[in-house]
């Protein structure tokens, strides 16, 4: 136990030293009414736990010092059996504490069990190791980065296509398992524009820790632009030779698994939908910045940088080929969207 936690701390510090994205999921910085309930409950429970810790360790320390062996005392000290007053105290106090915590918990659970009326519904599907998003009633979908309008309630309906995952954007809402064959639900209302870090929170295989995502909360105007652009999305004509080559390679190597809206493969669901990949801020399911530095090695050998990734390596692709594919998928873009400079949560 102790050794385990030392290992975790050493790894965390190593990650910080190596400049990895070690953003810690922080539930003490709630950004929604849902999470304020959870945080309030957590603080109350922690206060009680701290009081119990102080009283118990205080009594223990007092006893050890007060009743220690002194000088040349010999034999056992006087023995006592039973003390009605003490027994009543240590039965009544914990009972009261448990009743209070039960009441606070029930209050938070009831508050968070109320689903808002008129909310937008997003269907989240977990796959090893990425996320698919479908906006109900809008006829659009995306993957890994969920775009939402600020101050609009959203209901998230979750399931999984393989094993159990858990979708957890820590500052927005509590975590919820995504289970094959079952639909689980959550709701929240984002209150601040920003990019919210999310993490799969259920051990799901070799790249569980690398199954991340983002929730990008934007103004209503930006969201409307996204919806409009996504609805009428057409892959732009590959004008220059690099893009044309990239498009051709993409159609040969990638399109069997990845959907691009407005092409023959728009229904493919083996891998993430890449329709507006040019708007994506991250690559590899929230792992790295969406730049060629990360994108090229990812295209050439995905399992080499993300163990367990279902995307096969493509040893036959040259750097130039991979660069052309990267250029092509980055050209798949809805114009007028700007996610740069959003605060990070
Ligand atoms: Cu998916 Cu852990």
Image (cartoon, rainbow, N blue to C red):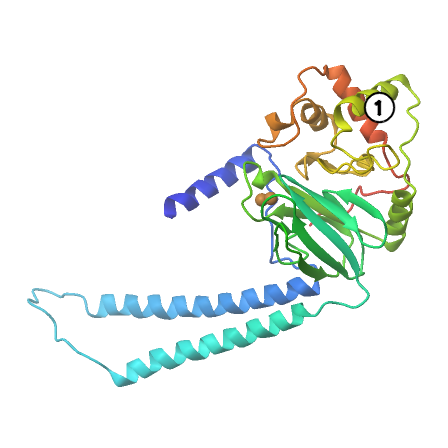
The mark total stands at 1
Nearer to me, 121 or 290: 121
Q: Quadrant of residue 320?
A: top right
Nearer to me, 71 or 308: 308
- In the picture, measured across the screen, residue 203 lies left or right of residue 63, that is right
Q: Is residue 147 visible?
A: no
Q: Quadrant of residue 207?
A: top right
Q: Is residue 234 visible?
A: yes
Position in image of residue 120 (x %, y %): 80, 59
Picture residue at 74% right of the left edge, 59% below the top: 155
Q: Residues within 10 Å of mark 1 (few under 14, many from 20)?
A: many
Query: Relative to residue 87, is residue 188 depicted above or below?
Result: above
Position in image of residue 165 (x %, y %): 60, 48
Find disc 1 in the rendering and name its residue.
247
- In the picture, measured across the screen, residue 28 lies left or right of residue 153, that is left
- In the picture, measured across the screen, residue 319 lies left or right of residue 60, that is right
Position in image of residue 111 (x %, y %): 66, 71
- In the picture, measured across the screen, residue 66 lies left or right of residue 223, that is left
Picture residue at 68% right of the left edge, 53% below the top: 158
Picture residue at 38% right of the left edge, 47% below the top: 2
Position in image of residue 251 (x %, y %): 81, 24
């Amino acid at each position: 136990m102790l050794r385990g936690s030392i290992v975790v701390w050493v790894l965390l510090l190593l990650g910080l030293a190596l400049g990895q994205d070690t953003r810690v999921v922080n539930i003490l910085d709630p950004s929604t009414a849902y999470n304020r309930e959870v945080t309030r409950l957590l603080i109350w429970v922690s206060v009680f736990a701290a009081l119990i810790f102080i009283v118990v360790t205080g009594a223990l320390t007092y006893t050890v010092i007060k009743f220690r062996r002194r000088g040349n005392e010999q034999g056992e000290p006087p023995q006592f059996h039973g003390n009605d007053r003490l027994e009543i105290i240590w039965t009544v106090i914990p009972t009261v504490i448990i009743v209070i915590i039960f009441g606070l918990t029930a209050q938070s659970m009831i508050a968070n069990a109320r689903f808002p009326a008129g909310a937008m519904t997003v269907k989240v599907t977990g796959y090893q190791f990425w996320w698919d998003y479908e906006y109900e009633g809008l006829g659009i979908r995306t993957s890994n980065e969920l775009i939402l309008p600020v101050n609009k309630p959203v209901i998230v309906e979750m399931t999984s296509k393989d094993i159990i995952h858990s979708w957890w954007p820590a500052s927005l809402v509590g975590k919820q398992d995504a289970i094959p064959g079952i639909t689980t639900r959550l709701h929240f209302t984002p209150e601040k524009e920003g990019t919210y870090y999310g993490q799969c929170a259920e051990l799901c295989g070799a790249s569980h820790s690398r199954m991340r995502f983002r929730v990008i909360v934007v103004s209503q105007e930006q969201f409307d632009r996204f919806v409009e652009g996504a609805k009428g999305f057409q892959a732009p004509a590959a004008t220059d030779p690099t893009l044309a080559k990239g498009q051709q390679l993409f159609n040969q190597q990638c399109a069997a698994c990845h959907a691009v809206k407005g092409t023959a493969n728009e229904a493919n669901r083996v891998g993430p939908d890449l329709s507006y990949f040019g708007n994506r801020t991250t690559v590899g399911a929230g792992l790295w910045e969406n730049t060629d530095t990360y994108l090229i090695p990812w295209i050439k050998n995905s399992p080499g940088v993300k163990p367990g990734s279902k995307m096969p390596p493509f040893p036959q692709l040259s750097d130039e080929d991979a660069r052309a594919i990267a250029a092509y998928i980055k050209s798949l873009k809805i114009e007028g969207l700007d996610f740069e400079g959003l605060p990070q949560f």
